[in-house]
Image (cartoon, helix red, strand yellow):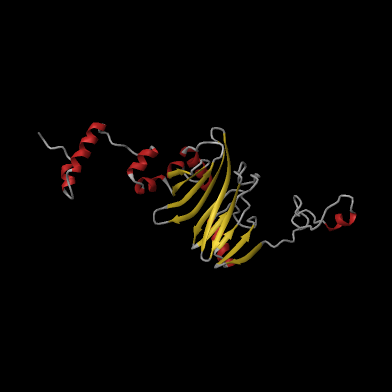
Amino acid sequence: MVLGDYDEFYLGSYSKNDSSVEQNIAKSPKVSSSYPTSKIIQIEDFKIGIIHGHQLVPGNGDVDTLVSVARHMGVDVLCSGNTHRFEANEEDNRFFVNPGSATGAFSAYEMNPTPSFVLMDINNDHITAYVYQLVNDEANGTYTIRTRKFISNSLLSRKQMIIDIIHPGSAGVSKKDIREKLASMYKADVEAIFVFGFKIQFGGGRSTGFALIYDNKEAALKLEPKFRLVRHGIGEGPKTSSKQRKEKKNRLKKLRGTAKTKGAKKPKE
């Protein structure tokens, strides 16, 4: 049993009237702190390091600082906390995860954090991280966002993942709300986040789709397909009428190969 504001375990029942028990209960962390500041464990092929994060400078979850600590500890995965804000990054061929606060308690770095926790499924040389977040939205009721198969793709300047949304009290969650929530989770620009391909599980209550989080809006404009930019509202759609587009489509049906390019233009009468 761990009592509030204490860092020691006490095994057995507790009675306020038992003076002998009172003597054995750990003092407040401000007086006594005997837990180690870090821990290294081996699970399957991964060496996992665990730290709180208050001893880091800066202690705001800075990636460069975490990389330095991971190198010093010689670990493949580093789990840290302190900020009460969920974060997940892949850097220096290592995985860094901050599960956030399960209760949503405030901290010096996040006054109103979203309650969250992380489950990691480790199988030999593969890790799948499941992120659970509790979001209270007035329009859609209460729903939970979970991300998995997280990949940091530096070549395309983006993070990509599969997201599961559990929404038992509503038919679905708007993409706008999902993008805003992901922007809060990953501290990214809303306009640089794209969500698509959602399918609702049979019976309702759960949706699964894809999410792309670009480093900036410029990278998104350069790499995203035009149709997705148009749907996103940051690209220009076709200016022709629906009748002209239909006629062009019918003309191209009769052509093959390079002739399609030439046939795209309406022949002069």
Query: Against 162, is 67 above or below?
Result: below
Question: At x 53% / y 53%, what residue is drawn?
Answer: 88
Residue 255, by quadrant, is top left
Q: Nearer the viewer, residue 211 or 27?
A: 211
The residue sitting at the front extreme is 203
Q: Residue at the left extreme?
A: 269
The image shows residue 245 at horizontal and vertical percentages of 24, 36
Is 257 displayed left or right of 145 in the figure?
Answer: left
Residue placed at 44% from the left, 44% from the top? Answer: 198
Residue 62 placement: quadrant: bottom right
The image shows a total of numbered marks equal to 0
Establish if 155 lies above or below 242: below
| Residue 78 seen anywhere in this rendered image of the structure | yes
Decide if residue 195 is in sight here. no
Q: Quadrant of the N terminus?
A: bottom right
The percent coordinates of residue 63 (x first, y second) are 53, 56
Image position, residue 31 (x, y; %): 78, 55
Q: Quadrant of the C terminus?
A: top left
